[in-house]
Image: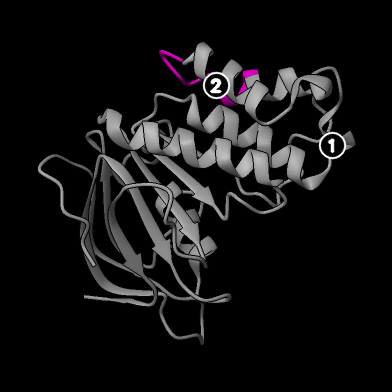
């Protein structure tokens, strides 16, 4: 499905991705992703995480073109990636950093960065007691909270969230949905949320369902 929008932020043209010997996750798929929150929906193993990595420019597509804020993949990969906020939840790249150092690293490309929203999310996610710790000392859920707080306070045109509720407690999930609902109403940025569950607490700009064909 192509989410409807009068002002597309991400242009997807004839995108194809398949691992060698596997059926394609996307084949000749074109879409225009506009401002607001778009759900990327599919069963476990359908390729949601893989597609997010392709959209982030972290994994090269096997065909097609992605254009974001005037930068296109594959010809302007570095400029494209600067416009995207994406953290792979399985990464250990930040483990040696302190929480504050990790957050500073993640927001380095953000001009401006919404410091008030970051602080509200630190409070809403109960991250305060963890700010002086190293990332490797945090639970899976607390690491995810750090990345989510930085992502939602970001100003980049495209934010990609992979199963954002994984490891979150009920209070943090309420904070997440409340903040995503605010972002959905603000305009100017697109957020794609990959989830195996439907989202009922956030107004959606559209839904993408895997697998994708032209």
Q: Residue at x 50, y 71 (%)?
A: 47
Q: Residue at x 48, y 58 (%)?
A: 194
Crowd band around label 2 with a 10 angstrom C-alpha radius: few (<14), some (14–19), many (20+): some
Task: Say if the magenta span includes residue 183.
Answer: no
Quadrant (top left, top right, bottom left, bottom right) of the N terminus: bottom left
Q: Secondary structure at mark 1?
A: loop
Q: Quadrant of residue 171?
A: top right
Residue 79 position (above or below residue 8) = above
Tell me if 71 is positioned left or right of 156 in this view.
left
**In the rendered structure, which segment of residues is drawn in magenta?**
104-113
Give the image location of residue 68, x and y in percent: 27, 40
Give the image location of residue 95, x and y in percent: 81, 35
Depth check, front residue: 191 or 117: 117
Q: Quadrant of residue 77?
A: top left
Q: Earlier in the sequence, mark 2 or mark 1?
A: 2
Res 69 visible: yes
Q: Secondary structure at mark 2?
A: loop
Residue 190 position (above or below residue 32) = above
Quadrant (top left, top right, bottom left, bottom right) of the C terminus: bottom left
Depth check, front residue: 76 or 38: 38
Identify residue for label 2.
107
Give the image location of residue 119, x and y in percent: 60, 16
Tag shown at residue 138:
1
Residue 1 position (above or below residue 68) = below
Q: Residue at x 44, y 85 (%)?
A: 23
Tell me if 145 is positioned left or right of 50 in this view.
right
């Amino acid at each position: 499905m192509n989410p409807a929008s009068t002002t597309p932020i991400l242009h997807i043209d004839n995108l194809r991705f398949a691992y060698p010997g596997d059926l394609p996750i996307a084949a000749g798929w074109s879409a225009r992703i506009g401002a607001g929150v778009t759900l990327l929906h599919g069963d476990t193993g359908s390729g949601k995480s893989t597609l997010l990595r392709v959209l982030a420019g972290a994994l090269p597509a096997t065909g097609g073109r992605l254009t974001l804020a005037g930068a296109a993949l594959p010809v302007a990969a570095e400029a494209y990636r600067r416009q995207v906020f994406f953290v792979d939840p399985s990464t250990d790249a930040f483990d040696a950093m302190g929480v504050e150092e990790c957050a500073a690293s993640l927001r380095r490309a953000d001009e401006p960065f919404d410091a008030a929203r970051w602080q509200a999310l630190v409070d809403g996610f109960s991250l305060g007691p963890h700010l002086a710790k190293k990332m490797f000392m945090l639970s899976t859920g607390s690491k995810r909270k750090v990345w989510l707080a930085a992502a939602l306070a970001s100003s980049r045109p495209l934010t990609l969230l992979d199963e954002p509720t994984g490891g979150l407690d009920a209070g943090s999930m309420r904070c997440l949905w409340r903040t995503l609902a605010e972002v959905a109403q603000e305009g100017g940025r697109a957020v794609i949320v990959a989830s195996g569950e439907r989202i009922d607490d956030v107004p959606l700009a559209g839904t993408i369902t895997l697998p994708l064909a032209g």
